[in-house]
Structures are given as C-alpha cells and as structure tokens.
Image: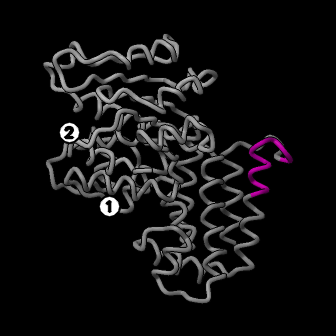
Amino acid sequence: MADISQIITEIKNNKVKPLYFLMGEEPFFIDQLANYMEDNLLSEDDKGFNQMVLYGRDVTIDEIISNAKRYPMMAERQVVIVKEAQDLSRTIDKLEAYAANPTPTTVLVFCYKYKTIDKRKALAKNIIKNGELFVSEKLYENKVAEWIRRELSHKKYHIDPKASNILVEFLGTDLGKINKEIEKLMIILPVGSTITPEVIEKNIGISKDYNNFELKKAIGERNVFKANQIIIHFAQNTKANPLVMTIGILNGFFTQLLLYHGLTDKNPQIIAKVLRINPYFVPEFQIAARNFPMKKVSECIALLRDADLKSKGVGANSLSEGDILKELVFKILN
C-alpha cells in the first residue's frame, strides 16, 4: 500500500488507478487525497459532464456502481467520488464484485473515514489487486510536530521546534485544526519565513511564556519562580489551561524521564530515539535528569496520579483546579 505522496506522484505521472479506497482513523489525509483527485484528475472543461460527487448517506452501493459503469462523455475518463462512505459500512461488501473488475474508464474514489474494512476479506483483496487501498492512520502526539515541520518544509516555510510543540500542546493531534492555523500564518508570513513562538503568540493567541511546555521546562530546571508564575496564570485561566491537560503532559514528561534513567547509553541520538523527541530537546531532559533522580521521578508520578484523582473529586475536599495544581507543583519541587 502506497503513502499519500506516492499516490499523488503516480497521479501526476498519469498512472491513475480505476479504484481508490481511502479509509482509516485520520480524516485529514483522506480529505487531502480526495481533494487532490477532485481538483486534478480532470480538466475544468471535463468536470461538468464527467465528475460526480456523491455522499454515502444519500446513495446505495448499487447506485454508485451504476454510475461507475457509465462511459465518459468526450473525455478519457470520468471521476466518481463518494464522500462520507462510512455511512455505507453495512453494505460495503456489495462492492466486492465491482472491485474484482472495475470499469477502466472510471476513477471511483471512496472516502471511508474513521473505519476500516477487513483486509482479509475478498473486497480488500480485490481493491489491492485492481486499485489502491490507502489506510490513513492517526498520528501519535510525538509524531505530529515532525509532520508540521514536513508540511511547512514542502511549502518553503520553517518552524522553530519549540513553536511546533506549542501548537501540538494547544491543538492536540487534530491535523485539520493544525493545518488551518498553519494556513493562516502562511497568509501573513512571506515564503521562506520561520514560524517562532512569538509569531504564534501574536497571530494565534497562544502564549509563548505561559503554557504547559514552559511549565514542564521550568519544573525540569527546578526553576521555582518561573513555575509558580505559570501556575498562577493557569489558576486564573482554568478554561484555557485545563488541569487534566497539564497533568497528562507532566505525566508524559516524568514517564520519559524514567526511560532516560533506564538508558545505559546516554548518547543524544539514542535519547532522542527512545524518548521520541526532537534532538533539540535532549538538553532539557539531561538537565531534568540531574534534578530528578529515578526515585524522585517515581514519587512525582505518584503525586500526579493523586492530583488526577483529586481533579475528579476523590479526596479533594472541594479544592479548585488552581489549588490542586499549586499543591502538585509545590510537592514536585520540594
């Protein structure tokens, strides 16, 4: 199975297949491929008669196949794109016979989001044999920052590693949301620019100084003053800085520190690979490891579990999120 860049390259080289089944948990890549095909498989003159966009909730498999078996009008091919095809999941196996012998003058595209078909069944095997079965996998959080860098690089932009981490922290792994914010920045910035934390703060509204990324760094450095500045800001803005997110990020940080302490080879490249971080951030873990020996790291993870329970009302005695966070950070740093 090809990746997204390979499929686009093949289309550019006119190696177009008659059937594309785009499925998986990450809708962004499915939309990206489908939009590319919608824009580029036919000329503007041919689209009027030979391009059709259908929606899974409005059609049956039989109707889709009937449309796919039509011949193009005064063109090399016709294109049929079925969006929200996951709505056809109960009857999708009826596509099996068509997938075994797809119409060569039709490009049939299924956008099957959030679900997958069984690769062991005949339908999947027929698609693989006669078309393209593309699986759009959800990116883990530690992969999203690198995806941001690659996307910007393709468009002749650069991003500071700290800036990409800030975006991931506040926008999570929603690639569609991240892409929208990136596109806004590209409208403002000239080609070749570097996106920095200052650019993000000014144009997106995410603070470059008061965020979980900076809190994690301050704790790792045992910078009590800076850590307290940040948690006071968080306590005053709990909606924008939910405690559950802070606890999750700090738990991930101390879990990585445990892995660091367990390494026999402290080569920076090994550290980056095992901790799944950008090499740029290795020095921060080296500092944190000196400040937090393994025993203390284990204690901090226990403190985070206790704070998580308190945030859910277990033994919190009606403490606010801000008070739970202040207590947590005090215990971590003392």
Residue found at x 50% / y 64%: 226
Q: Is disc 1 surrounded by few (<14), some (14 to 19) or many (20+) residues within 10 Å?
A: some
Read off the residue under disc 2.
Answer: 187
Write down the quadrant of residue 317 in the picture. Answer: top right
Write down the quadrant of residue 31 in the picture. Answer: top left
Q: Is disc 2 surrounded by few (<14), some (14 to 19) or many (20+) residues within 10 Å?
A: few
Residue 98: x percent and y percent? Answer: 47, 26
Residue found at x 60% / y 65%: 253
Residue 235: x percent and y percent? Answer: 59, 46
What scheme was used to colour the molecule?
one colour
Classify residue 136 as left or right of residue 242: left
Residue 301: x percent and y percent? Answer: 73, 65
Read off the residue under disc 1.
Answer: 160
Classify residue 322 as left or right of residue 58: right
Q: What element carries label 2?
A: helix
- Is 297 above or below relative to 22? below
Residue found at x 76% / y 57%: 305
* For marks 1 and 2 on the same chain, the one whose residue lies earlier in the sequence: 1
Q: Nearer the viewer, residue 218 or 29?
A: 29
Classify residue 125 as left or right of residue 51: right
- Is 163 above or below relative to 241? below
Q: The residue under label 1 is which amino acid type? A: Asp
Residue 25: x percent and y percent? Answer: 54, 40
Q: Which mark is residue 19?
A: none
Q: For the magenta stretch, what is the residue range?
A: 305-315
Q: Is mark 1 on a helix, strand or loop?
A: loop
- Is 211 above or below relative to 276? above
Q: Which SS type dominates the magenta stretch?
A: helix
